[in-house]
Each structure stands twice: as structure tokens, then as C-alpha cells.
Image: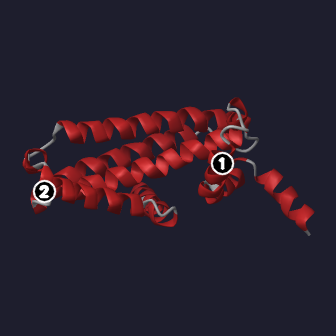
């Protein structure tokens, strides 16, 4: 019974993060664009079952998961809190497997509803965007910005800082809670 509650909580967390991070907007854009593309490319959309385009979407999602794991594990090693928690990698693997399962089920929902690839594009693009944002925030917190010439790319970094603001705050709170407490005390 405890496993069902945990799995239900995981589904709830996944969808709440999708809404809180506004990743659903990217999914809507992808769903609408795939709907528009269905008028232009009927062979791809009308095909029953998995197509090359579905596989490419899943491969991109898996690649972003890989980058997230690499950056996240590096960040966890530097964190005084997360480096002591051994189940973080297992939780991430389960979460990623659930996301992949959601995307695969979306293909079947598209087939059932005959909605072409709109449901699949919505979920896959939303999850790619959400996890790519996590990769960028992890890299930012790790200080990898220093590897790029700041003067030439300064306008990009200003935009990235604004784009990642909430994600960076959430990750800092998760990985370095002591430093966040010090910052709050300094503000007072």
C-alpha cells in the first residue's frame, strides 16, 4: 500500500512541477505545431503506432535525461546534504522511467483518440523543456558559466539568469540549504 501512495505522490509531483515551471506552455506549442504539421505532413501523422519522429522525440528526451543525470550527480557530490542521501539516484531513475512511460502511453492515447501526435508532442516537448531547464540550472549552480567568454555572451547570460531564476532558487534550496539560510539571515 505504501508503494502505491509513493507512486501516486510521484505522479502528482511530476504534474505539479510541469504546471509550476510552466513547461506545459512548450507542450501546448508543440501540440499545436504538430497539429498544424499534420495538415502539411499527413503521412507522418496518420501513421499508426510508433514512427521515426516518435523515436526521435524519445531519444532527445533520453539525451536530456542523461545530461540532467551528469550535471545533477556532479551537483549532488558538491552538496553537503544530497551527498549523504543514497536514494536520490534511484528516485531519479524511477521518475525518468515514469516520464518515459507517460510519453509512450501518450502515443497510444493518440492512436485511441485518433488525435494524430498531439498528445505525444505535448507531453514529450513539455518534459524535454522541463528537464533541459534543470540541466541549465545545474550547470549554472556548478559555475560552468565561467567556461564561456562572458563579455561576448553577456546578453545571453542575462536572459538565462532571468529564465532560470526560479529553478536556480529551488535547486539551491535543495542542494545547499545551509547557504540559503545564511543569505536570509544576511538580508535581515
Q: Which mark is residue 155?
A: 1
Q: Secondary structure at mark 2?
A: helix
Q: Which mark is residue 8?
A: none
Distance, label 2 to label 1, CA atoms, is 38 Å
Can residue 84 be seen at all in this image of the molecule? no
Q: Earlier in the sequence, mark 2 or mark 1?
A: 2
- Left or right: residue 100 versus residue 170 is left
- Left or right: residue 3 versus residue 121 is right
* Crowding near the residue tagged with mark 1, few <14, some 14–19, many ≥20 C-alpha atoms within 10 Å: few
- Total labels: the figure holds 2
Q: Secondary structure at mark 1?
A: helix
Residue of label 2: 39
* Crowding near the residue tagged with mark 2, few <14, some 14–19, many ≥20 C-alpha atoms within 10 Å: few
- Left or right: residue 50 versus residue 153 is left
Q: Please report the residue visible at 25 percent of the width from the left and 53 percent of the height from the top.
A: 120
Residues at discs 2 and 1 in contact (Cβ within 8 Å): no
Quadrant location of residue 89? top right
Quadrant location of the C terminus in the rendered image: bottom right
Quadrant location of residue 109? bottom left
- The mark lying in front, picked from 2 and 1, is 1
In this rendered view, identify the residue nearer to me: 105 or 91.
Answer: 105
Amino acid at each position: 500500500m505504501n508503494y502505491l501512495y509513493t507512486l501516486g505522490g510521484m505522479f502528482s509531483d511530476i504534474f505539479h512541477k510541469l504546471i509550476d515551471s510552466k513547461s506545459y506552455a512548450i507542450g501546448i506549442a508543440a501540440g499545436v505545431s504538430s497539429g498544424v504539421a499534420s495538415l502539411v505532413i499527413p503521412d507522418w501523422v496518420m501513421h499508426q503506432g510508433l514512427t521515426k519522429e516518435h523515436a526521435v522525440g524519445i531519444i532527445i528526451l533520453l539525451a536530456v535525461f542523461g545530461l540532467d543525470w551528469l550535471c545533477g550527480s556532479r551537483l549532488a557530490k558538491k552538496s553537503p546534504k544530497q551527498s549523504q542521501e543514497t536514494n536520490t539516484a534511484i528516485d531519479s531513475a524511477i521518475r525518468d522511467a515514469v516520464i518515459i512511460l507517460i510519453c509512450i502511453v501518450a502515443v497510444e492515447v493518440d492512436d485511441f483518440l485518433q488525435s494524430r501526435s498531439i498528445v505525444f508532442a505535448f507531453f514529450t516537448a513539455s518534459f524535454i523543456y522541463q528537464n533541459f531547464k534543470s540541466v541549465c540550472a545545474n550547470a549554472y549552480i556548478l559555475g560552468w558559466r565561467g567556461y564561456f567568454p562572458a563579455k561576448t555572451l553577456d546578453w545571453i547570460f542575462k536572459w538565462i539568469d532571468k529564465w532560470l531564476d526560479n529553478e536556480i532558487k529551488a535547486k539551491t534550496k535543495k542542494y545547499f540549504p545551509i547557504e540559503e539560510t545564511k543569505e536570509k539571515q544576511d538580508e535581515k
